[in-house]
Amino acid sequence: MKAVVLILILFSQVSAAKILSATYEVSFGVFDTLGIADARFETRDDQTYTIRIEARTAGIAQTLTNNRVEIYESHGIVRDGKLIPQKYSKTRRTDSKKSIKIYTFDHDNKTVWRETIEKDEWDRVKHDFYATEDILTLFFNFKHSMQSRQNRSFAAIGGNKQDGRIDVVFPANDDLDAMKRKLETTKGDFLKVILNDRIFASAQGELLINLGRDGLCDKAILEDVLFFGDVVGKRVE
């Protein structure tokens, strides 16, 4: 289910929408669709926002994972066109268990507090590092870096556990041509996002991403996973 991150980039260039939604299918090598991800972004007149992504298994994966569902949410304010998170949460549930992690931002004191809720247990501790963004707002706010097209490193809550580092690379020349062939299109913008985290058997979690004309992600690929090939996320509506 970590393949849900394939669709996080979909908010990267949206700026004026009040409500935006999209649905993605995730497939894995020789298998058919193994997951569906529904994404919704909403801004309100009081200058607050909500981002919600619900990813659920399908097909054989639904049976093997006991109907696993993951929900990612970000809540905060909009200031000068930029999203500033106040709370980020991740909920993971199956037919037999449920766990929740909630991250609360204290920007004034450069601190993030992490709550863990599982069964009847609850714990609240200071997170290992502070970041100004979570992984959902990072990709929305990334539109401010698109014009310069310079490779950059970011930190985000919800990224890798060590320091949240995420690298964004703009391919050029032969690398760009190879990415276009891999993604089977020459249209739109192309990015490589390195999550610096193991996803399945991909050591760094490198994603090839194609953004459509509307700024939404049309297709994303996590290459060479396990023995079966690529994990592919495609926008279906």
Image (cartoon, helix red, strand yellow):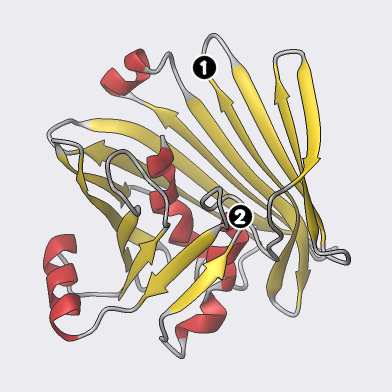
| Residue type of the residue flagged with mark 1 | Thr
Query: Residue 63, position in %: x, y?
Result: 34, 13
**Marking on residue 107:** none
| Residue type of the residue flagged with mark 2 | Phe
> How many numbered markers are drawn?
2
Q: State the SS at label 1.
A: loop
Give the farthest residue toward the top.
96
Q: Quadrant of the N terminus?
A: top left
Query: Residue 54, position in %: x, y?
Result: 53, 37
Query: Residue 132, position in %: x, y?
Result: 70, 66
Q: Circle 1 sits on which residue?
A: 94
Q: Is residue 214 visible?
A: no
The residue that appears at 42% across and 86% down in the rendered structure is 150
Q: Circle 2 sits on which residue?
A: 41
The residue that appears at 50% across and 27% down in the rendered structure is 69
Name the side, left or right, on which 233 lies relative to 120: left
Residue neighbourhood size for the residue with mark 1, other residues' Cα within 10 Å, grouped as few (<14), some (14–19), many (≥20)? some
Give the farthest residue toward the right.
108
The residue that appears at 37% across and 45% down in the rendered structure is 198
Name the side, left or right, on which 210 lies relative to 122: left
* Distance between the alpha carbons at the discs numbered 1 and 2: 25 Å
Give the farthest residue toward the bottom.
148
Residue closer to the observer: 227 or 11? 227
The residue that appears at 43% across and 43% down in the rendered structure is 4
Name the side, left or right, on which 98 lies relative to 217: right
Residue closer to the observer: 152 or 28? 152
